[in-house]
Image (cartoon, helix red, strand yellow):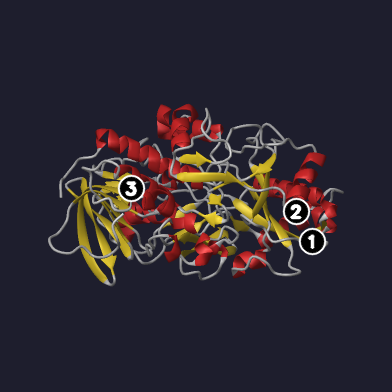
């Protein structure tokens, strides 16, 4: 990986321009650069630190979640409405590694049902679980299971499951067993959903983002350049083909030329860049005065995400600080009826107080600990609107949460199960039950709905803004525009039944493999 900075001397033309150095972009660029005769340029809007000592300590400490800290410099905020009356701010990483540098290190694979759904929606046989499993194995080094039919030991991303010996994690596991939930020791194995440790890209207390995991191993490659502080404003399309990008560096705008452009800017920025480049719904582009290059109504038309609530509880005695990760165990509830996929209700344990996660501290004496509960049903209820032709203006997001009675019922269900867990004798060894909602609210649907609305948050799992089928093919190629691909969670037609970080890396691997098999036009340098 060559150091950041401006090109010097004559203009350089790259075979591939990758926009974004996040989960998908870092993985994709590193794989492409394994071919020495392919030149790759990665443009990242945020800073690009080099070796780990160049990263701020909280970006490496797996016991912290920088994305939860308001105003953190490595995070880009986006205004949103979770419901019509619930304004919110969603965030994405703006630094080498993208959101894998600022998130919780949760690295859980999508479920087989997700792949079946994506294949049927437009991905085709390529997106079946059986076809994707070799890529899932190849991207990881599983430190718990090693090489086998389900896991790999030679991939760039090291995966380790969270330690359940912390007293709160042990109590959570005992309470889950008490209530009859099955054990799920490997949440990346497609077993029956239940309680178990969380697969994570945090190893020995260090959050290893994809910039470090994927791109740092390519350090010194003359065919790979990673440029930080480089904000892409649009894609240049000439005679139906993407030929480069317009990029702003330190207040100066330039055009960088390339043989192929791959947008890996994330599910919020990639659709915005497409629309700013004239690729999207004709009526929306016309309102902004943007000439239409390709009418693709699906771009930004909808997205999926997962609603989330924080449920706090007070420890009965001082508990030790977590050692390796802020995460304890996770419980995915078996299906309670035939209308929903098994495991779509998640209860995720935090071993660091929420006040610590938002304040950048591992320990706050006397502060409550928390569970993060969410409904991860694949429901694409969101809408993304680009309101300005100015690339520096963020798009507007409307998540459309709680739009049906069933949405509200599912959130009530997962809240009540969490309350049951904390009320067991096993959990009473460490805690005294939920701080709120209290018994009166828990017993009344109307009161609980009101409490949920007032505390509603999101998992920041946006997917589906440039979906497989209507917008791109199985390898991310944008319909009707040669030389242009999208490779990030934008292309997933629905959000997966688990957090999408591992799937984002998978997308980078799959698209890179397709390009390496000869689908990219070489232009020379």
x and y percent of residue 414 in the render?
A: 71, 47
Residue at image mark 1: 315
Label 1, label 3: how many angstroms apart (C-alpha)?
Answer: 45 Å
How many marks do you count on the picture? 3
x and y percent of residue 120 in the render?
A: 46, 30
Circle 3 crowding by C-alpha within 10 Å: few under 14, some 14–19, many from 20 = many
Do the residues under discs 1 and 3 have CB atoms within 8 angstroms? no
Circle 2 crowding by C-alpha within 10 Å: few under 14, some 14–19, many from 20 = many
Rendered-image quadrant of the N terminus:
bottom left
Do the residues under discs 1 and 2 have CB atoms within 8 angstroms? yes
The label number, if any, that marks residue 187 in the structure image: none
Q: Secondary structure at mark 2?
A: helix
x and y percent of residue 33 in the render?
A: 29, 45
At x 63%, y 41%, the residue is 344
Residue at image mark 2: 168
Q: Quadrant of residue 478?
A: top left
Disc on the earlier residue, 1 or 3: 3
Closer to the camera, 44 or 434? Answer: 44
Closer to the camera, 417 or 62? Answer: 62
Name, please, the residue furthest toward the left: 10
At x 54%, y 32%, the residue is 112
Label 3, label 2: how many angstroms apart (C-alpha)?
Answer: 40 Å
Up the image or down, 33 lies above or below 313; here it is: above
Residue at image mark 3: 29
Disc on the earlier residue, 1 or 2: 2
Q: Secondary structure at mark 3?
A: helix
Closer to the camera, 147 or 292? Answer: 147
At x 51%, y 57%, the residue is 398
Label 1, label 2: how many angstroms apart (C-alpha)?
Answer: 9 Å
| Residue 43 shown left or right of residue 347 in the figure | left
x and y percent of residue 503 in the render?
A: 48, 42
Q: Secondary structure at mark 1?
A: strand
């Amino acid at each position: 990986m060559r150091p950041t900075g401006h090109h010097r001397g004559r203009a350089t033309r790259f075979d591939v321009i990758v926009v974004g150095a996040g989960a998908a972009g870092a993985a994709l660029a590193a794989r492409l650069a394994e071919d020495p005769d392919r030149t790759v340029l990665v443009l990242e809007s945020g800073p690009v630190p080099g070796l780990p000592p160049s990263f701020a300590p909280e970006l490496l400490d797996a016991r912290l979640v920088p994305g939860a800290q308001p105003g953190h410099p490595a995070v880009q905020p986006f205004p949103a409405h979770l419901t019509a009356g619930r304004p919110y701010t969603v965030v994405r990483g703006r630094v080498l590694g993208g959101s894998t540098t600022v998130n919780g290190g949760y690295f859980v694979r999508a479920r087989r049902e997700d792949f079946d759904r994506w294949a049927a929606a437009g991905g085709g046989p390529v997106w079946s679980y059986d076809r994707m499993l070799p890529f899932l194995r190849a991207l990881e080094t599983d430190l718990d299971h090693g090489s086998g039919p389900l896991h790999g030991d030679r991939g760039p991303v090291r995966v380790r499951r969270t330690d359940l010996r912390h007293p709160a994690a042990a109590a959570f596991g005992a309470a889950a067993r008490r209530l009859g939930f099955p054990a799920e020791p490997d949440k990346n194995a497609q077993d029956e959903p239940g309680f178990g440790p969380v697969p994570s890209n945090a190893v020995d207390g260090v959050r290893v983002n994809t910039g470090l995991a994927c791109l740092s191993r390519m350090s010194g490659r003359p065919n790979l350049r990673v440029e930080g502080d480089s904000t892409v404003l649009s894609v240049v399309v000439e005679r139906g083909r993407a030929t480069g990008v317009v990029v702003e560096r330190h207040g100066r705008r330039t055009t960088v030329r390339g043989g192929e452009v791959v947008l890996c800017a994330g599910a919020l920025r990639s659709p915005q860049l497409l629309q700013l480049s004239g690729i999207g719904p004709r009526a929306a582009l016309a309102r902004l005065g943007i000439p239409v290059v390709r009418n693709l109504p699906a771009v930004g038309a909808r997205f999926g995400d997962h609603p989330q609530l924080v449920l706090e509880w007070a420890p009965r005695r001082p508990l030790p600080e977590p050692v390796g990760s802020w995460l304890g165990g996770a419980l995915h509830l078996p299906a309670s009826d035939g209308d929903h996929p098994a495991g779509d209700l998640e209860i995720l344990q935090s071993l660091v107080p929420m006040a610590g996660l938002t304040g950048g501290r591992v320990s706050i004496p006397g502060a409550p600990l928390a569970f993060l509960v969410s409904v991860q049903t694949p429901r694409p209820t969101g809408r993304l609107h680009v309101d300005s032709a100015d690339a520096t203006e963020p798009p507007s997001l409307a998540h459309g949460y709680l739009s049906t009675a069933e949405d509200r019922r599912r959130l009530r269900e997962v809240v009540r199960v969490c309350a049951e867990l904390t009320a067991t004798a096993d959990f009473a060894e460490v805690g005294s039950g939920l701080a709120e909602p209290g018994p009166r609210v828990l017993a009344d649907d109307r009161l609980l709905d009101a409490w949920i609305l007032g505390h509603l948050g999101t998992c920041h799992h946006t997917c589906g803004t440039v979906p497989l089928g209507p917008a791109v093919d199985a390898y991310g190629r944008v319909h009707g525009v040669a030389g242009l691909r999208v490779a990030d969670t934008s292309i997933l037609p629905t959000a997966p039944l688990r957090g999408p970080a591992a799937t984002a890396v998978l997308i980078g691997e799959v698209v890179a493999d397709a390009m390496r098999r000869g689908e990219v036009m070489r232009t020379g340098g």
